Amino acid sequence: MGSDSGRGEMSPDALERLLRERVDAHRAVARKGKLATYIPALGDADPLHLGVAVCLADGRIVAAGDADVPFTLQSVSKVPALLLALMDRGPDTVFQHVGMEPTSEPFDSILKLELRDPAKPLNPMINAGAIAVTWLVAGETAEARIARLLSFVRRLCGNDAVAINERVYRSEWETGDRNRALAYFMRAIGALPREADVEEVLAVYFQQCAIEVTCADLARMGAVLAFDGVAPWSGEQLVPREVVRIARALMVTCGLYNESGRFAVQAGIPAKSGVSGAVLAAVPKRVGLGVYGPALDDKGNSVAGLSLLTDLAGVLRLSLF
Ligand code: DON
């Protein structure tokens, strides 16, 4: 772990003190944000919660704040889904169905879908792209696909107890008109094949979004990405290095939607957010981070979470650039 004097080692105790201090300093920022209530179950969160966990190169977790509060992955699930689709189908097939370009539109926008030729979503980190990626995850049935995804997420989190929050899943299923509109529109324009069962694809997508974790789980997932696919707690290669490289690149350019550029300039860390207030971050060869702060900015990203991460990136010199 780097210290403010450069890339020297910071002891886990010193890191914990720093995390505690910085979490306390950023809690007030949460007051500037709002909970995502378009998925009604997410409206029950405490908007002032803020937690962070860091997974070190030896797999140890250092955490502070409300790091034990469970939350759902939401759009953070777009990263494990992409990793699995790339492992199942290979990059050539995946990128026939989804692009690699950043967006200046909100995460759930339909606008660009009609304008692009050939018809495909801009990137795998926005909702349309993620729905296409979910369809690419191998499995004969919706049940088989979500079971594979869940077991993959458990391995990335080093935690067999990770499960789907059924209440959040139902809540989104009942209110997910916008994603339904996106998915049916995609099938109409050929961005999803005619034979795709849209309701089944959506069932998998909504369930992957409702996978429940804590900051430590997210930090371990970040560490797998940081250490080129190897789980630092076991030494096992969980994801091929080349697949991780693709995911990290898309996290930098597209992970925070139309706020990705600002975060790249100010923090410089590959990251992926979710409307639950989750933020996954991976600093290559250094650490994985998991942050939770459910109050969101107007782009749908954790407002206190991003300010905390930006601060930590400065203090610990985590920027890639
Ligand atoms: O599909 C949705 O709208 C949500 N399940 C996930 C969106 C999301 O997390 C966007 N992130 N900031």
Image (cartoon, rainbow, N blue to C red):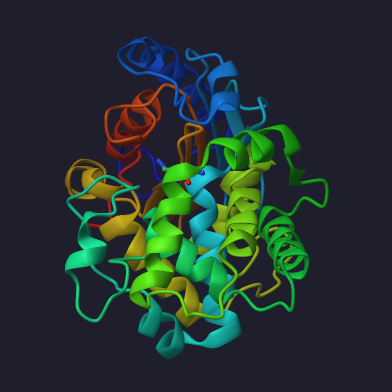
At x 49%, y 80%, the residue is: 194
Residue 212 lies, in percent from the top left, at: 68, 40
Question: Which quarter of the image is occupied by the C terminus?
Answer: bottom left
Residue 61 lies, in percent from the top left, at: 64, 41
195 is higher (above) or lower (below) than 261: below
214 is higher (above) or lower (below) than 184: above
From the viewer's perspective, is 112 left or right of 313? left
134 is higher (above) or lower (below) than 177: below
Residue 284 lies, in percent from the top left, at: 42, 61
At x 28%, y 76%, the residue is: 119
Say which of 318 and 266 sits in front: 266
Q: Tell me if residue 57 can be seen.
A: no
Q: How many marks?
A: 0
At x 30%, y 44%, the residue is: 317
278 is higher (above) or lower (below) than 91: above
Residue 12 lies, in percent from the top left, at: 58, 36
Q: Quadrant of residue 92?
A: bottom left
Q: Tell me if residue 193 can be seen.
A: yes
Which corner quadrant of the figure contains ligand 1?
Answer: top left
Outermost right residue = 161
Say which of 177 and 33 sits in front: 177
At x 64%, y 43%, the residue is: 210
From the viewer's perspective, is 185 left or right of 208? left
Say which of 11 and 90 sits in front: 90
